[in-house]
Amino acid sequence: MSEKRRLIIDCDPGHDDAVAVIMAARNPKFELLGITTVRGNQTVDKVTTNALNLCQYLDIDVPVCKGMTRPMVREGPPVEERLHGETGLDGPVFPPLTKKLDPRHGVDFIIETLLASDRPVTLVPTGALTNIGMAIRKEPKILPKIEEIVLMGGSYQHGNVTPAAEFNILVDAEAAHIVFSCGRPVAMMGLDITRQVLCHPGIVDRMRQVKTKAGKLFVELMEYFSMTQKRVFGWEGGPLHDPTTMAYLIDPDCIETREMNVQIDITGGPSHGRTNCDFFGLLKEAPKNAKVAIGINVERFWDIVEESLKMYDPL
Ligand code: BDR
Ligand code: CA
């Protein structure tokens, strides 16, 4: 077998972030080096507690480092309490927390881990891009150590917080600008595909048959998330935005991408936070700086989720 792909997950768990972590941590294709957290779905303290609870419950033995409490330049939208609840991960009840927070700041953990690695590392941001943007600005020597940045965010069509902008990008558009213009490979899993993988009740019932700790947790997470998604957006199930990053990494054939120029709107106007994607290649001279997801094999996606849940200890 070829070498495992090294990953750092930078997240704001968050129900769909939690599923992305579940998919990564036991997959034999990956070596998960650590988890960093960022303000987004809830305050950074709350999402960090959620990451620790998740790791403790599923015996995921990796460092969890708390990252940025605020965006780099301007205040973004409020935390996403409507969808993720007061804790940021409402639904499951975890045992008392004993797993300790790693004392390193998330930004420094990313820098130190990349510099110390003898081969490139893939960054998987499933929240705002504040930690990654800060790490690139603080220590540009990390750039050659970044194999790829596989992120959930943006959309070449419509937004989900404003008509133009998706939440993760809007929270810190300036950080997103740094990431998309950093010169390293970027793969963007946007709303265009993530809205196609709605975790409707039939999917929840299917995963209920997976009798592992991860299967049980998935059901508890999705029962809550589906309820709030229905209330806020009218969806019949919660879109599993963040797990599309892992589906792409586990089986690239599951997701169709197209290389294009992507520029982040940081003008502060009504389209602030929009990922302007040159879908038709109109900007002939502009660099194709990202692979943008344009299609997803929905059946294959759910198979990958199910296979991932089966990798955990039985109940
Ligand atoms: C993104 O926003 C967050 O609420 C989700 O976790 C996901 O990362 C979707 O817009
Ligand atoms: Ca997220």
Image (cartoon, rainbow, N blue to C red):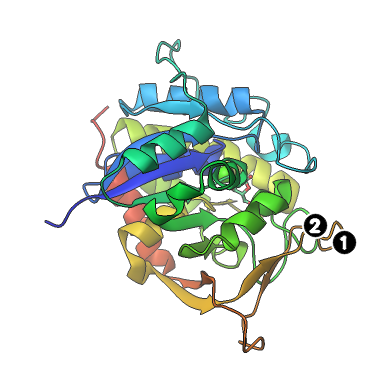
Q: Where's ligand 2: which quadrant?
A: top right
Which residue is the site of mark 2?
A: 162
| Residue extending furthest toward the right | 269
Q: Is mark 2 within 8 Å of ligand 1?
A: no
- In this rendering, is residue 35 above or below 241? above
Q: Which residue corresponds to the image point at 51% horizontal and 50% vertical from the top-left?
A: 242
| Residue 290 place in picture, x, y as percent | 52, 69
Q: Secondary structure at mark 1?
A: loop
Tell me which amino acid carries mark 1. Pro
| Residue 44 place in picture, x, y as percent | 62, 28
Q: Earlier in the sequence, mark 2 or mark 1?
A: 2
Tell me which amino acid carries mark 2. Thr
Q: Quadrant of the C terminus?
A: top left
Front residue of 304 and 106 = 106
| Residue 299 place in picture, x, y as percent | 39, 65
Q: Is residue 34 toward the left or the right of residue 238 in the image?
A: left
Which residue is the site of mark 1?
A: 270
| Residue extending furthest toward the left | 1
Q: Crowding near pointer 2: few (<14 within 10 Å), some, many (20+)?
A: some
- In this rendering, is residue 107 above or below 63? below
Q: Viewer-nearest of labels 2 and 1?
A: 1
Q: Is residue 18 toward the left or the right of residue 122 in the image?
A: right
- Asked which quadrant contains residue 22, the reply is top left
Q: Quadrant of the N terminus?
A: bottom left
Mark 2 vs mark 1, CA separation in Å: 8 Å
Q: Secondary structure at mark 2?
A: loop
Front residue of 18 and 257 = 257
Q: Crowding near pointer 1: few (<14 within 10 Å), some, many (20+)?
A: few
Q: Which residue corresponds to the image point at 46% horizontal and 56% vertical from the top-left?
A: 149
Q: Is residue 117 visible?
A: yes
